[in-house]
Amino acid sequence: MSRLIDITNQRFGRLLVLGRAKSKTNNGNARWKCLCDCGNYVEADGYALRHGITRSCGCLRREISSKAAKCNPSFIANQGNSLKNEDGIGYSSLYKGKRNRTGVIGVSYDKQSHCFVARLMFHGRYVLNHATYDFNEAVKLRKEAEARYFKHSVKEKQ
């Protein structure tokens, strides 16, 4: 005896069910071919449709996210910007990340050129991007650039 619930021609949110899809979900639920109000075709799990989990092809989520973003002043202010402190200095320039292998912020090793690279980004542009074969020289270049550009931010860290 089949437990299939036929939901053809029923509407779930923005989706109109056109018929059964050939494939099944990984858990054995039936999949259904649907037409979204925006014009996209999508296959959806019957259980997710009936329980309100799937209500569109994804256009509803994009609309809700877009509206929420337009009403969020901090999102608008930081759109396109990396995370920065009150001085406008990116946190990636101030704190050592977990992928750092040299132990020094802003100094990395380039395996292709076998060089150490000292970098410093200040207000969205590189003010230091220098390659050297000597690790200590790269560290010195980075520290000099920090002292020059970060002035009072470096004092706060110490």
Image (tube, helix red, strand yellow):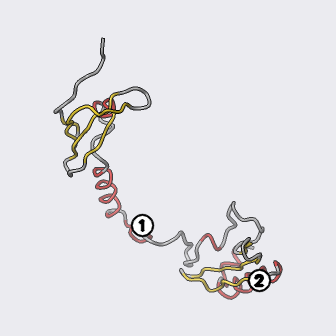
Point 66% across, 78% down: residue = 153
Query: In x, y percent, where is residue 67?
Result: 29, 59
Query: In x, y percent, where is residue 147?
Result: 71, 85
Q: Image height check: is 136 above or below 96?
A: below
Q: Earlier in the sequence, mark 1 or mark 2?
A: 1
Quarter assignment of residue 94: bottom right
Query: In x, y percent, where is residue 3?
Result: 30, 17
Q: Quadrant of the N terminus?
A: top left
Residue pointed to by mark 2? 132
Q: Is residue 69 left or right of residue 34?
A: right
Q: Image height check: is 29 above or below 141?
A: above
Q: Residues within 10 Å of mark 1 (few under 14, many from 20)?
A: few
Q: Is residue 126 left or right of residue 132?
A: left
Foreground disc of the pair 1, 2: 2
Q: Residue furthest bottom?
A: 148
Marks 1/2: CA–CA distance = 40 Å
Q: Which mark is residue 74?
A: 1
Point 22% across, 28% down: residue = 7
Quarter assignment of residue 21: top left
Point 32% across, 49% down: residue = 58
SS type, badge 1: helix
Q: Residues within 10 Å of mark 2 (few under 14, many from 20)?
A: some
The amino acid at mark 2 is Thr
Quarter assignment of residue 127: bottom right
The amino acid at mark 1 is Ser
SS type, badge 2: strand
Q: Residue furthest left?
A: 9
Query: In x, y percent, where is residue 133?
Result: 80, 81
Q: Which mark is residue 107?
A: none
Q: Quadrant of the C terminus?
A: bottom right
